[in-house]
Image (tube, grey):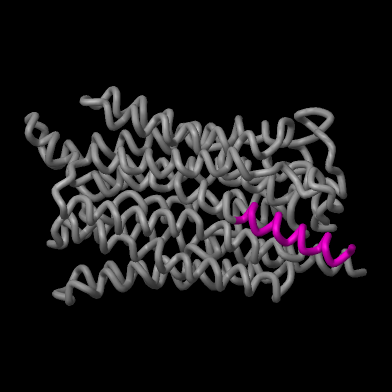
Amino acid sequence: MAAARDRSLRYGQARTILVLFGGYAACYYCRTDLSVATPLLVEELGTHGISHSEALVRIGTLSSLGVLAYALGKLFLTGLGDYWGGRRNFLIGVGGAMVFTLIFAAGGALPVFTLAWIGNRLTQSIGWAGLIKVSSRWFDYSSYGSIIGILSISYLVGDALARQQMGMLIEHGYGWRGLFGFAAIVAGAMLLANLLWLRESRVAEGHAAAMPNPLNLFADADSRPASVGALLLPLLRSRAFVLVCVLSFACTIVRETFNTWTPEYLHHLGYSMSHSATLSAIFPAVGVVSVLVAGWLSDRLGLNGRSLLMFLGLGAAAAALLALMVLRSTSSPLLLPVALIGVVAFCLLGPYSYLGGAFALDFGGKQASAASSGIIDGIGYLGGVLAGYGVARLSVAVGWDGVFLALAAVSALAAVCAGALHVLNTRAARSAHA
């Protein structure tokens, strides 16, 4: 009987991972489409008398408004998952991505594009917190690093596959509308899968409740929070939580810059539009390896391992960004910048995956995991706003070398914050042990 229950639990956990993975990967098809389509949109805007530089700034502005909507949704809407359940949050995220991507594809002017993109990012903003909430009720804390590592590569796999497949579509003559329509079809298929097979918790299927991190800020509570204050104040009073939010702000600037502008940067280097879209997949593809390695290591190094790996990874990312600037300033072979983009991805994306995932579960437990994830990610995406309009302006004013220098400075400052977080975590662990 016990063996049968264990098999049933493992089956339910595997099913939950698969549908959450597929659903969140589909959401990234509905984000990557804008990045891949940027050279095509710039070209089309040029036919309406808009210069290349001005078109970049307008698309950068659209991107920043979308990231701002995403950040605000993270901050003010994701906590709903702690009241009505993570499944509903997740379904809204995937369904909203599909609907607003279709609206974007049907539009023909910047105002429609902007409204559709804002709606897309706003509804998607609650999806990841829903995933985290469901995970907190399906998995024990001892496996957070590995499980969230696996789920974190969903957006990297989705991003990489979308760039590869959309690059092929461009090569076969499809325009930007075809890319958006394709993304909406993928999201619709994954929405149906989650409607059919995603369950809120393992308790609903007759299994014992999942075990939260014993050092979380909400003990073992699994009930609805008594009030908004009871949900938020324990998080905001934690110095370690505040440091994780600062890290999220800095890391998201770097990540969103590469997510948004890699195809345009590679096109600037001389690659064709289709080749630029395909090569830009190196950032999320290398990130998959980084996230898996970082998740596996963090579970084996213990609670302090995550902050240590963040410190090492962010310091190495700063060095790689400086190297990217130096090589771009010389007559370096064309593939070297592409290789260095992969190095940045490996150093950054594994540690980045801890922030709104394993760290959020560590702080929020089963009661406040959605709010914890939403606040961390929301503050991060406020930084990500700078990756759209700010990077567009910076690249026009001082070139890509200036962009990489600024990103290196951001990564170095983030490494210092990760070092401070490691000190706090070490002291907390010693106090708990004593």
Answer left or right for 43 relative to 100. Answer: left
Residue 229 drawn above or below residue 434: above
Residue found at the very far right of the displayed protein = 434
Q: How many marks?
A: 0
Choose between 388 and 3: the one closer to the eye: 3
Magenta stretch containing residue 15, yes or no? yes
Q: Quadrant of residue 57?
A: top left
Magenta stretch containing residue 349, yes or no? no
Answer left or right for 179 relative to 353. Answer: left
**Image location (x, y in percent) of residue 186:** 40, 44
Name the chief secondary structure element in magenta.
helix
Q: Which residues are magenta?
A: 1-17
Answer left or right for 44 relative to 183. Answer: left
Q: Quadrant of the N terminus?
A: bottom right
> What residue sits 78% from the left and 46% below the top?
366
**Image location (x, y in percent) of residue 163:** 31, 55
**Image location (x, y in percent) of residue 212:** 81, 55
Residue 128 drawn above or below residue 160: above
**Image location (x, y in percent) of residue 238:** 74, 48
> What residue sits 45% from the left and 44% below the top?
27
Choose between 46 and 421: the one closer to the eye: 46
Residue found at the very far top of the displayed protein = 111
> What residue sits 32% from the left and 44% below the top?
33
Q: Quadrant of the C terminus?
A: bottom right
Choose between 304 and 272: the one closer to the eye: 272
> What residue sits 80% from the left and 43% below the top?
204
